Image (spheres, rainbow, N blue to C red):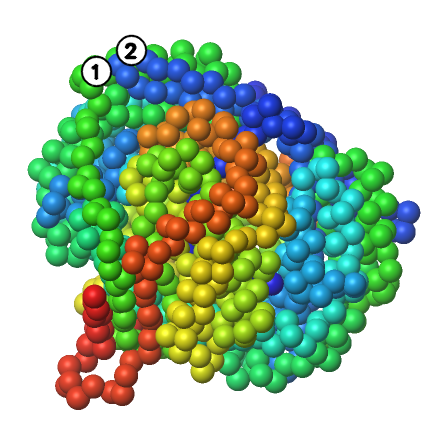
Amino acid sequence: MTITLTATETPSRASTVQKIVSKGGIEAWLVEDYAVPLIALEFAFKGGAAQDPIGKSGAATLLASLLDEGAGPYDSEGFHRALDEDAIEISFSAGRDYLSGRLQSLARNTARAFELLRLAVTAARLDAEPFERVVSQIAAGLKREANDPDFVAGRNFRAAAYPNHPYGLPVRGDLSTLPALTRSHLIDLRAVTFARDNLKIAAVGAINAETLASHLDDIFGQLPDKASLIPVAPAAFAGAGTRHVASIDVPQSTIRFGREGIARKDPDFMAATVVNHILGGGIFSARLFREVREKRGLAYSVYSQLTAYDHAAMFSGGTSTKNERAAESMAVIEGEILSLANDGPTEEELDKAKKYLIGSYALRFDTSTKIANQLLHLQTDGFGVEYLDERNKLIAAVTMQDAKRAAKRLFGDGKLLVTVAGQPEGM
Amino acid sequence: MTFGELLPARESVYLNPSAQVQGKPAGPAITQAKLGNGLEIVVIEDHRAPVVTHMVWYRNGSADDPPGKSGIAHFLEHLMFKGTKFHPQGKFSELIADVGGQENAFTSNDYTAYFQRVAKEHLSVCMDYEADRMKNLVLTDEVVSPERDVVLEERRMRTDSDPSEQLGEALQAALFTQHPYGRPIIGWSHEIESLDRADALAYYDRFYTPENAILVVAGDVDAAEVIRLAEKYYGPIAARGAPPKRFRPREPEPRAHRLVTLADEKVEQPMHQSIFLVPSYRSAAPGEAEALEVLAHVLGGGHTSLLFKTLVMEDKIAVTAGAHYQGTSVDDTRFYVFAVPAPGVSLERLDAAIDAVIAGAAHGVQAADVRRAKTRLVADAIYAQDNQATLARWYGASLAADLRLEDVAQWPERIEAVSAADVQKATRWLDKRRSVTGFLLPAEAPASSATASSEKAASLAL
């Protein structure tokens, strides 16, 4: 069954986006909007934690954390003071495949904000004092989570899913790799990943194309033309069919489950998205919510999701249930996954999931920062601006045949990698 | 580096600067109205995206749970999704999902709120839904029972599996010895277990009335049209009379500092937290709450704050430190100060250093520090204009905490008006006798106990 969009189709979202190219060749997507006097900028360099040197997990995170801890003429305190004086927000973070930055500023402080961003991107000092301090902050965070069941189940899941691959390692590093990091590691990492051919940018707010373009040249124009990334091999999901239990003395078991996913550009990705929504993507409507939480009162939180990295794709989910009933929760989840794999969804489920996914897309675009984030991710995922208008049509086009095929591909024999933290009975 | 919050999300009042504040734009149009049955309405217009956020706030929260029935406000919140006389469980959620809407609800000390976010043309579905369950909720033991299990799992997830959260719960109980803010919003385990259908319905009958509710609608809407729709859907709900009075036993003036420690084998990173009993935006004298807001920023609002500079950068005895004022509250409220010790530093030593920083502020604060704190706070109000859901939440929380629209509208000016002298004066509330201090510690040497249960030794030292 196909859904036709109603006569009240939303106007083209793609037409609100300007594709800018600066004089120096820096590209960005811009949505001009003067309703609120602010600008939001998001950008990302490809690389991220996947580029951490062997044995030096946490390098990208540490680098990102230090970029706002002193740059150019400002030491750490001076840089923060400069940000605070004009209520400018600049921050950086590292993920599996990208090192990202974001900026938010009142429109009247735009020039100053971009100047500080330029310093952070091109002249971060990585001084000894903040280096030591930030390492100990990250270490304190890791210690804090060391026996947190959520953290433990997640970490073990990742390690079992991608052994011998950067994706199996912690993005923040761990207590053994952090002490091995030096300033030179970070300098080297920055030198190979901060480049112009590696960079995606999105901006939303009270700024025009010309002004933005000239700031982009200031900020990014002097970076090397080309990045030199370590090639990252594709990672196949390992461990489906195995279970790992980490014993932690808590009354509730936290469970992570998953198996191989579907690549972002795979023609079945949209159908898989619909199928995942039916299983555990929605709240009240999802099978997992109904069966695990509502009917049986087994859990407060139960969910599933599709994740597409640059070099891997994963189907995963989780829940937390008291120790005595953890095995029961897992059995119910496995049952629903197998049922979808073998029989596919019902017509009603398919229809409702598509309706939800189509209708909810607009909710991603109601604030400047959310729009900037969406535009950045479209670019890093390798889509063009027209995707903003195409996306709902792709969902609408998913047929029952597509959904059944995607369910079979996604869930296959139903075998899952399962990691548990707690004291589950019978597991 | 910026840190994830160690504390619950800010409850502060942010909003659009008023047109009078120099150099600042007027912000979104705000319209206030009231129906004949007492339902208050606030409309916040934001026409940038064809989306609307629809919220109903009830002026009651966990602090209004009857004694012995802690957690009932939160439990009822869960049960409000279980169906009405006219619509079976899940029917409305299905309607919302079919149009791609998102919905949820939350309970706090002073309010319980329900919301949906939908494309603007579906606003009336949301109103139909909330009006129906304001009046026509039905509950059976078959739905109540498993949902009680869900709440127990939620409690296990949030608190029972986390020593830091357990300490937090003990701290609230030690700070509020009489006032019900000392009880956890989700309730004590043993009291949750005894909550039943009758308890939920009694609470519902008492508090879920139009006089006790505030409708907040934000987004791409026209105020007059919203009020017209509200009259159509909420208007027919019969008035009950005056809104229910909420009575909370007042917390007596604190006279003694309390130290609460929790040692647990799962703890690898010790932590320090203090909570002071201070006036709220609602209970404070004019200007006092604003001064506390600025003080929190000056003391612990980031890298340039006094606690961070002294403890982390200069003395190097902490890896992070901060402060937070939870001002949007009906009754006297919390002022948090927290710090994570550097390796090898005892919590006692850290505690003394924190006391010294506060004592220093009591002698005077720098005008430049105050200026910077105010800049941040007022700017946050402009950043908030970008997000209709954020604005809706702030207005709703403020009105539910018995503040008025003007209090919200004038907040940036009142913050701007805070002087260094005001901030210094506000430090009188950070008297150690008005506070509890929590030490989160790794377990001592392994106990001789043969049981498998962890070393949860929460002791209250007076």
Which residue lies most toward the front here? Answer: B363
Place of residue B423 in the rendered image (x, y in percent of width and height, measured from the top left):
49, 47
Pointers 1 and 2 in contact (CB under 8 A)?
yes
| Host chain of mark 2 | B
Please identify the residue farthest to the right as the structure is shown.
Answer: A23
Residue in the image at 69% along x and 59% along y:
A79
Question: Tag 1: Cα neighbours inside 10 Å, few (<14), some, or many (≥20)?
Answer: some
Q: Position of residue B267 (x, y in %)?
A: 35, 75
Q: Quadrant of the C terminus of chain B?
A: bottom left
Query: Residue at point 54% right, 60% down?
Result: B306
**Quarter occupied by residue B314:** bottom right
Residue shown at the point (60%, 55%) measured from the top left: A264
User: Between marks 1 and 2, how big is the CA–CA gap?
Assistant: 8 Å
Q: Quadrant of residue B332?
A: top left
Q: Earlier in the sequence, mark 1 or mark 2?
A: 2
Is A81 displayed left or right of A260 in the figure? Answer: right
Say which residue label 2 marks. Answer: B36
- Residue labelled with disc 1: B239
Residue A85 appears in the rendering: yes
Q: Which three-letter amino acid code belongs to the residue tagged 2?
A: Gly
Q: Is residue B8 visible?
A: no
Residue A400 image point, x, y percent:
46, 43
Question: Which residue is depicted at the point 17% across and 88% down?
Answer: B448
Q: Secondary structure at mark 1?
A: loop
Inspect the image, locate mark 1, and give the three-letter code of the amino acid beneath it.
Ala
Is residue A48 toward the left or the right of residue A316 in the image?
right
Front residue of A374/A356: it is A374
Indicate the quadrant where residue A284 lies.
top left
